[in-house]
Amino acid sequence: MAVSGAPATPEELKQRIESGIPGATAEVTGDGHHFNAVVSAPAFAGLSRIAQHRLVYDVFGAEVGDRIHALSIQTKASEPRTESIA
Amino acid sequence: MSDETTNPLREQIQTAIEENPVLLFMKGTPEQPMCGFSARTVAILQSVGQPFAAVNILPDPRIRQELSTLSNWPTIPQLFIDGELVGGCDIVTEMYESGELQQALGLDNGAPSGPAPEPQAPEPAPLSIENRL
């Protein structure tokens, strides 16, 4: 877990998203306060955008809006890796 | 049930959400947004010609606390349509670009609109309502 008080980094956010949401891959950019995350995960399949974004926000809880000042999110449902499905 | 206290502020927020078909909780006002994400969301609503009510959450930090508890959504802005949370700036932008926002608002056939508008210099917002919470 992050040391509280330490500045957030894109690498930290990426790791926490990927470990917090099964099968997720994340690309995170940011300057320590404002971050942008593009997240793909099989868990998003069938969920509304709201529900998808909540899964990402839930990784960080009350840190969003506080230690992580702003977090923009784009989500994509990724297919579980299987042989080609038409 | 025993809510430990009555919570007038939360009730006021709930009432505002129920009574305004399109309601934006934002930082600042439509005329003077105080945050880029709020400004962008206002610009999108104005560009589709959608009248909306707006609540500035900045004057009292408790508004944001109660709103986020109520909506289970941590960030501002928050757009509600017909009493339902639609999302924040990212989701509103995506929905605008795909035409889903216009569809949700009942404005047109939901044809994709291309890139979202950038915030312009402030202009009077039509029919924006400053709720006094």
Image (cartoon, rainbow, N blue to C red):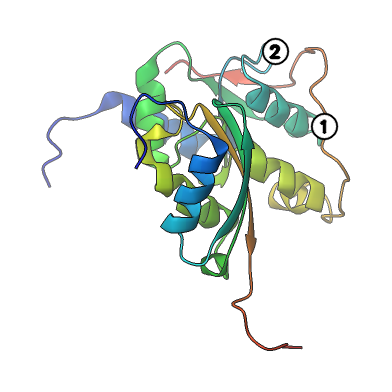
Locate residue B126, reporting x and y percent. 74, 21
Image height of B125 relative to A75, above or below: above
- Quarter-wise, where is residue A75 in the image? bottom right
**Would you say B32 lies left or right of B85 here?**
right
- The residue at the point 76 percent across, 88 percent down is A86
Image height of A27 relative to A46, above or below: above
Tell me if I can see residue B12 in this picture: no
**Would you say B74 lies left or right of B1 here?**
right
- Specify the subunit that label 1 lies on: B
**Label 1 sits on what residue type?**
Ser
Image height of A80 relative to B116, above or below: below
**Label 2 sits on what residue type?**
Glu
Q: Which mark is residue B31?
A: 2
- Quarter-wise, where is residue A78 in the image? bottom right
Tell me if I can see residue B90 in this picture: yes
- Quarter-wise, where is residue A20 in the image? bottom left
Marked residue nearer the N-terminal end (1 or 2): 2
Label 2 crowding class (10 Å Cα cut-off): few <14, some 14-19, many 20+? some
Count of numbered labels shown in the rendering? 2
Q: Secondary structure at mark 1?
A: helix
Location of the C terminus of chain B (image quadrant): top left
- The residue at the point 45 percent across, 41 percent down is B73
Question: On the image, numbered disc 1 is attached to which residue?
Answer: B47
Locate residue A45, reporting x and y percent. 57, 70
Locate residue B93, reporting x and y percent. 72, 41
Question: Along the line of sight, which residue is nearer the eye, A84 or A15?
Answer: A15
Question: Along the line of sight, which residue is nearer the eye, A82 or B9?
Answer: A82
- Specify the subunit that label 2 lies on: B
Q: Secondary structure at mark 2?
A: loop
